């Protein structure tokens, strides 16, 4: 996916016209990705729509322009998985390794262990970890959403990561 770096930078800086143009340009590529990443029971257009919304909300958090293609790919893939889980009422990982949720990684045991470690966290730590590491919210966005100070968010993320490490050591 090739995009005009000036357009990307303008979008990153908050230019709404640039964001709209960028989203219009990347929609066909996002749809192509969704068609390849979504399970057959998930409508790729739903994943694209949710992904466009996330890109719109978080384009300012994109660290480098060069990361845009990989960043958008991961957003679409994550939305495909999220929609699939929502449709099937999945709140935990299934037992069978050939389950569609495991399709995109070769490290089944690591993925299962990491998911179990995150699920074992107390709610306040799990929520902070998911928002930061999976939803890619900034510290300020998490603080705003959870009605906490930035310091409290950083503390929860740090402690949550420590707990995950402790879980994985065992």
Image (spheres, helix red, strand yellow):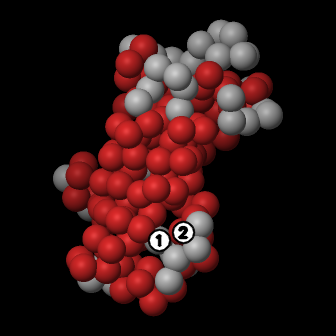
Q: Is residue 111 left or right of residue 68?
A: right
Q: Please count the marks in the image.
A: 2
In the rendered view, tell whether residue 42 sits above or below residue 163: above
* Residue 33 at least partly seen: yes
Identify which residue is drawn at 67% across, 26% down: 102
Give percent across and percent down for residue 111.
69, 31
94 or 79, nearer to the observer: 79
Label 2 Cα crowd, 10 Å radius (few <14 / some 14-19 / many 20+): some
Q: Residue at x 35, y 37 (%)?
A: 46
Q: Quadrant of the N terminus?
A: bottom right
- Residue appearing at x 58%, y 74% in the figure: 2
Estimate the x, y position of residue 24 in percent, counting from the top left.
Answer: 35, 65
Mark 1 surroundings: few (<14), some (14-19) or many (≥20) residues within 10 A: some
Front tag of 1 and 2 = 2
98 relative to 129 in the view: left or right: right
Q: Earlier in the sequence, mark 1 or mark 2?
A: 1
The furthest residue to the right: 106
Please provide percent x and percent y for residue 92. Answer: 51, 18
Would you say residue 127 is visible in this rendering?
A: no
Q: Mark number for residue 68?
A: 2
Q: Which residue is mark 1?
A: 62
Task: Residue 89: give x, y in percent of width and height.
Answer: 39, 14
Which residue shows up at 36% across the image and 65% down it? Answer: 23
The extreme top residue here reads 95
Q: Are marks 1 and 2 in contact (CB under 8 Å)?
A: yes
**Residue 130 occupies which quadrant of the picture?**
top left
């Amino acid at each position: 996916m090739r995009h005009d770096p000036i357009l990307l930078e303008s979008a990153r800086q908050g230019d709404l016209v640039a964001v709209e143009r960028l989203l219009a340009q990347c929609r066909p590529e996002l749809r192509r990705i969704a068609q390849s990443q979504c399970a057959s029971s998930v409508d790729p257009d739903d994943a694209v729509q949710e992904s466009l919304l996330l890109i719109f909300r978080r384009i300012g958090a994109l660290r480098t322009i060069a990361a845009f293609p990989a960043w958008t790919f991961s957003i679409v893939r994550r939305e495909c998985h999220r929609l699939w889980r929502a449709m099937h009422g999945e709140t935990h990982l299934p037992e069978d390794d050939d389950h569609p949720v495991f399709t995109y990684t070769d490290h089944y045991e690591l993925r299962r262990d990491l998911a179990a470690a995150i699920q074992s966290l107390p709610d306040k730590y799990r929520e902070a970890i998911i928002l930061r590491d999976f939803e890619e919210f900034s510290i300020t966005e998490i603080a705003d959403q959870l009605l906490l100070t930035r310091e409290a968010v950083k503390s929860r993320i740090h402690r949550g990561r420590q707990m995950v490490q402790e879980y994985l050591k065992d």
